[in-house]
Amino acid sequence: MSRIKTGGRVAGTPNKVTIEIRSALSIALSGELERLPETLAELEPQARVDAVIKLCKYLVPPMAAIASKLADEHDYQPDRYTKGLKPAFDLDLL
């Protein structure tokens, strides 16, 4: 037997505690963001690169993988286009 909901928050209403926590974090982090360039400059190069890489996920949206069906749909044969071409340079020198 299912119960009829008679009270509580309406769907989509933000939780008050969540709003308060986010507000407090925003205030605390705003000072850190202002000091970020100086903080990064004080790090060793490898630590700086690691920090920037970790911060990137908050600045750049992730890219979704896209499957290509080009080869399957169009009978893609790269050798057909490159057969008989000469290299632009001598590979034996490399």
Image (cartoon, rainbow, N blue to C red):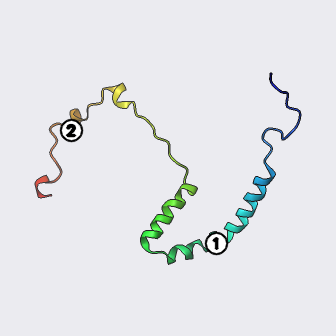
Foreground: 81 or 8? 8
Going 16% across and 48% down the picture, which residue do you hit?
A: 87
Q: Is 3 positioned to the left or the right of 22 in the image?
A: right
Going 83% across and 39% down the picture, which residue do you hit?
A: 10
Amino acid at circle 2? Thr
Determine the secondary structure under disc 2.
Answer: helix
Q: Residue furthest front?
A: 1
Foreground: 18 or 86? 18
Location of residue 43 with respect to 54 vertically, above or below: below
Q: Nearer the viewer, mark 2 or mark 1?
A: 1
- Using the image, tell me which numbered label, if any, was put on residue 82: 2
Q: In which quarter of the image is the N terminus?
A: top right
Number of marks present in the image shown: 2
Foreground: 86 or 34? 34
Q: Is 67 positioned to the left or the right of 54 in the image?
A: left
Task: Tell me where residue 33 appears, x and y as whole percent.
Answer: 63, 69
Task: Tell me where residue 12 appears, x and y as whole percent.
Answer: 78, 41
Foreground: 38 or 71? 38
Reading the image, the residue beneath label 1 is 34
Neighbour tally class for label 2: few under 14, some 14-19, many 20 plus, Cα within 10 Å: few
Distance from Cα at disc 2 to Cα at disc 1: 54 Å
Going 75% across and 60% down the picture, which residue do you hit?
A: 23
Q: In which quarter of the image is the C terminus?
A: bottom left
Q: Earlier in the sequence, mark 2 or mark 1?
A: 1
Location of residue 62 with respect to 94 vertically, above or below: above
Q: Which residue lies furthest to the left in this view?
A: 92
Going 67% across and 72% down the picture, which residue do you hit?
A: 31
Location of residue 16 with respect to 10 vertically, above or below: below
Determine the secondary structure under disc 1.
Answer: helix
Amino acid at circle 1? Glu
